[in-house]
Amino acid sequence: MTDLPVITHWIDGAPFDGSSTRTAPVFNPALGVVARNVRLAGTGDVDTAVASAQAAYPAWRDTSQARRQSVMFSFRELLNARKGELADILTAEHGKVTSDALGEIARGLEVVEFALGMPHLTKGEYSENVSTGVDVYTLRQPLGVVGIISPFNFPAMVPLWFFPIAIAAGNTVVLKPSEKDPSASNWMAALMTEAGLPAGVLNVVHGDKEAVDALLVHPDVQAISFVGSTPIAKYIYETAAHHGKRVQALGGAKNHMLVLPDADLDLAADAAVNAGFGSAGERCMAISVVVAVEPVADELVAKITERLTGLKVGDGMRGCDMGPLITKAHRDKVASYIEVARTDGAEVVVDGRGIEVDGDASGFWLGPTLFDRVTTSSAVYLDEIFGPVLSIVRVGSYTEGLTLINRSRYGNGTAIFTNDGGAARRFQNEVQVGMVGINVPIPVPVAYHSFGGWKDSLFGDAKAYGPAGIAFYTREKAITSRWLDPSHGGINLGFPHNA
């Protein structure tokens, strides 16, 4: 494997080998082979990246908003024109099909476009004459160097949730993408440089826990943004907060879709398949549990099963519906839940093992898998499986379904399918989940709202992008100003008051 390409870091506006000689394999999951290797940063490499960002910060902070917006607009145009290149990178390293890769980029572009409004979004407020001759106004200013740690499942979209807002607001960035599919981050950093971004404003370091820990404790990193599993999100939050940093730590999920008896079952079945098996289920907003309110479960299971038999699994470059999982180890772990389901008494309606695929037999394949009559005590129900596995839980009423959802430790996303407006309104009020869909299975907010869940799906209270993203990457300064009349004089030691 020594002759394979090596993905380097991107520091100070150019590829950077770094001092660490450790590497990790990057697979083509559709072929099941190592396609390239990636350098894994040591603490010294992270220090170099942070130093580059720190050196670039004063000039970028003081760059006019017009100039910053010009760079972001150029990046938006370049990314839109060349999104096909990035989609091919996502498919080759993650495995998701091309249409899904393009959809990921489109959702990331929404945040870039939101960031183009930064001059308006960071405007302060002004109150005149709050006291005689005294005015008060506020400013929003950048933080400094911020760290971003992104997951493997959205190699383009999740970084795009964060760095356009951070950079447009005047911060500099060190991005640590997943070492499983790292090339997208280098590609976007190079595109930002092409758009006119000064060296050091956006740096990319690749690595594992050593690089993550170095960012979390670095004294010159002011804030950390993270998306990933709940145990790691909790660790990120606690470690970074302990070291005095602002933290956005978005964790895992077990998203439920409640289907009421009055729902359009064809619409619900389509939604369950789309939201359960898109991107091979490797989405934190995937529907993994369908809560069917009787008496519709049998009919709904039949409709979902019928749709699964028509899905084409294979190489994402070949126009298939669903691609492979990210690694063999992850595929094997997800597949192991099939026997867990059987042991726990669930019915395996569709077994995704051993399916016929349109791709190389060595790829990390697991077809759509459907369990019925899953109990809430089973690991199949409790664990975030993060693969193409959909569970059906049967309940007798709306109230029973709502109670089941609210008992979950997770609170990322949920959905209700119904034609009853009163039931939908009651659900959106009573459900204890951060993002809710009404006849919408993946309720990811648009860029001018914010993304984030409740309970063990979010640590801290800082959601991603939208108004929450602006607040996270800036800090408010309040200024109280009096320009004295030249004739004023005298001393008064009393406490200032509105007189």
Image: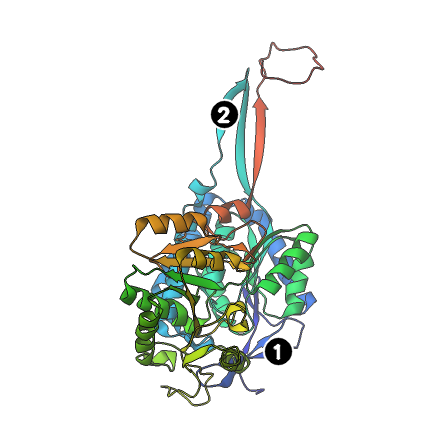
How far across and down, in percent of the image, does residue 140 sit?
Answer: 53, 39
Q: Residue at x 38, y 82 (%)?
A: 315
Q: Check disc 2 and report its element: helix, strand or loop.
A: strand
**In the picture, which quadrant includes the C terminus?**
top right
Nearest the camera: 241 or 281? 281
Residue under pointer 1: 23
How far across and down, in percent of the image, does residue 186 sit?
Answer: 50, 68
The answer to which quarter of the image holds residue 297 is bottom left
Residue 136 left/right relative to 121 = right
Residue under pointer 2: 127
**In the picture, which quadrant includes the N terminus?**
bottom right
Q: Residue at x 44, y 81 (%)?
A: 366
State whether residue 118 appears in this view.
Answer: yes
How far across and down, in percent of the image, does residue 84 sit?
Answer: 36, 70
How far across and down, in percent of the image, does residue 318 sit?
Answer: 33, 81
What count of labels does the image hold?
2
> What amino acid is at disc 2?
Ser
Q: Residue at x 62, y 73 (%)?
A: 40
Nearest the camera: 301 or 126? 301
Q: Check disc 1 and report its element: helix, strand or loop.
A: strand
Looking at the rendered image, the disc whose residue lies closer to the viewer, 2 or 1, is 2
User: Distance between the Cα atoms at labels 2 and 1?
Assistant: 56 Å
